[in-house]
Image (cartoon, grey):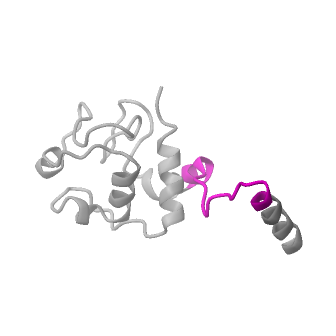
Amino acid sequence: MKRSLLVAGFLATVAGFTPPAHAQDAAAGAIVFNAVCHLCHEVVEGKNRVGPSLYGVVGRRAGTMPDFTYSPVLKASGITWNDDMLGKWISAPQNVVPGTRMTFAGLKDEKKRRDLIAYLKTLHN
């Protein structure tokens, strides 16, 4: 098995393509969501739980989901949820917006964060 991976890596390099160190995996991100996020968040459009629905979150301005009461500090943050901001937020929400109501301690595993963001990107029309 190790030999086949080395050969594949060599051929990819010779062909001028080097795969990224970690490609995002939306299917793995769905597993992360179900393990870490689903108790507080929904992925159905317009359906909120303790936290707002994450349907369509990528590209949305923080604190703007209708029918959800956000903390004043999050509403005033000016954040738009892109890959970078989601990565920081998922890593440590209180570091990004001190005083936010989100009590999640953060997801420290970078691969899981990237996969989760890849999954969140699939949640739109």
Which part of the image, by quadrant, shows the N terminus? Answer: bottom right
Work out whether 93 lies above or below 44.
below
* Residue found at the far top of this picture: 125
Q: Is residue 19 left or right of residue 78?
A: right
Work out whether 30 lies above or below 61.
below
Of residues 14 and 70, which is closer to you in this image? 14
Which residue is painted at 77% across and 58% down in the image? Answer: 12
Q: Position of residue 97 (x, y in %)?
A: 20, 58
* Quarter location, residue 52: top left
Q: Which residues are magenta?
A: 12-31
Q: Position of residue 14 (x, y in %)?
A: 79, 59
Of residues 4 and 94, which is closer to you in this image? 4
Is 53 included in the stretch rendered in magenta?
A: no
Which residue is painted at 50% across and 56% down in the image? Answer: 114
Of residues 50 and 59, which is closer to you in this image? 59
Work out whether 69 lies above or below 45.
below
* Residue found at the far bottom of this picture: 2
Q: How many marks?
A: 0
* Quarter location, residue 18: bottom right
Q: Position of residue 104 (x, y in %)?
A: 32, 62
Q: Is residue 22 left or right of residue 14?
A: left
